[in-house]
Image (tube, rainbow, N blue to C red):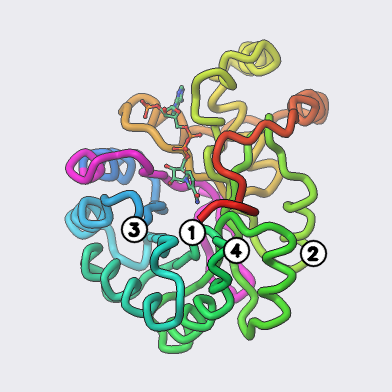
Amino acid sequence: MNTITLNNGVTMPQLGFGVWQVPDDEAEHAVSAALAAGYRSIDTAKLYQNEAGVGRAVRESGIPRDELFVTTKLWNDEHGYDRALRAFDASMERLGLDVLDLYLIHWPAPAQNKYVETWKALEKLYADGRVRAIGVSNFTVQALDRLLDEAEVVPAVNQIELHPQFAQDALRAYDSAHGIATEAWSPLGQGKGLLDEPVLTRIAAKHGRSPAQVVLRWHIQLGNIVIPKSVTPERIRENIDVFGFELDPGDMTEIAAMDADRRLGPDPATFG
Ligand SMILES: NC(=O)c1ccc[n+]([C@@H]2O[C@H](COP(=O)([O-])OP(=O)(O)OC[C@H]3O[C@@H](n4cnc5c(N)ncnc54)[C@H](OP(=O)(O)O)[C@@H]3O)[C@@H](O)[C@H]2O)c1
């Protein structure tokens, strides 16, 4: 498994497992299947209501804790310094873990105007050793500019919507220039639609791989961290099997040309 070294020296697997929209009991099975398939990084959130299931799978896996990387996120109704500290405690209680690997502000929610105050709470959790790295999600250039002006700790990660039809070149470049790792959510464009695109099926056939594997390989070669989600055992295995082949520069160019500014999720400038 490739790893990415974050700006504080902590290493994170480049490919992990997402569990959005997976109910708590199903999350336990899916995460257990993912860990058995070799995944070592799991991405959950307070919003997903499955931190407890994720925690059970992690604790019961028998895998040493220091070989696992667990991310969770603070939801939009938990912004503010004290609320954020309480939100972290509640997430850790549900996960059943002592130390978290990565804690993210899920959305900047600019209308609330509290993300800087919230970040101060994450800095405190980090300083106290309760979390190994802190970061943000869905932060725009504008939100990052403001945060970096006021922050003591530069976010380790910005987790954003990113797939071939929404390639986010400008934000990726901004993250990179500031030492922030870019993590792609909905890396498969949520599956349907994107994976049937003829460009991808043709490149997949050429390499004897699936379109999903081609998309994940594209992310890996760009340097993105990816967290594909699946509850289907064979897809769980397929999605991690992307380190044994390479896309050539022509493939990368063709996939880059698919960018259509096609956002699937909410606009962070107005959401929350
Ligand atoms: N920070 C944020 O705001 C944010 C927002 C959204 C997501 N996320 C994170 O990112 C993770 C991934 O994003 P996502 O769940 O939105 O979408 P995704 O990973 O791009 O796609 C998941 C969908 O693709 C299907 N799929 C998975 N592997 C496949 C394969 N090999 N072939 C065909 N179809 C496949 C899955 O179906 P089955 O499950 O039925 O197999 C599911 O319907 C989430 O789980 C979550 O952890 C974060």
Which of the two labelled residues, at mark 2 and mark 1, occupies the earlier sequence position? Answer: 1
Give me the C-alpha separation between circle 1 and circle 4.
12 Å
Give me the C-alpha separation between circle 4 and circle 2.
23 Å
Give me the C-alpha separation between circle 4 and circle 3.
19 Å
The answer to whether the beta carbon of the residue marked 1 is less than 8 Å from any atom of ligand 1 is: yes
Reply yes or no: does residue 228 show up in magenta.
no
SS of the residue at dot 3?
helix
- Identify which residue is drawn at 52% across, 83% down: 120
Which of the two labelled residues, at mark 4 and mark 3, occupies the earlier sequence position? Answer: 3
SS of the residue at dot 2?
helix
- Identify which residue is drawn at 38% across, 60% down: 70
Amino acid type at mark 3: Lys
**Label ID, residue 106:** 1
Q: Which residue is mark 2?
A: 177
* Range drawn in magenta: 1-28
Q: Position of residue 11 (x, y in %)?
A: 53, 65
Q: Which residue is mark 3?
A: 46
Give me the C-alpha separation between circle 2 and circle 1.
22 Å
Q: Nearer the viewer, mark 2 or mark 3?
A: 3
- Identify which residue is drawn at 54% across, 44% down: 185
Q: Nearer the viewer, mark 1 or mark 4?
A: 4
Q: Nearer the viewer, mark 4 or mark 3?
A: 4
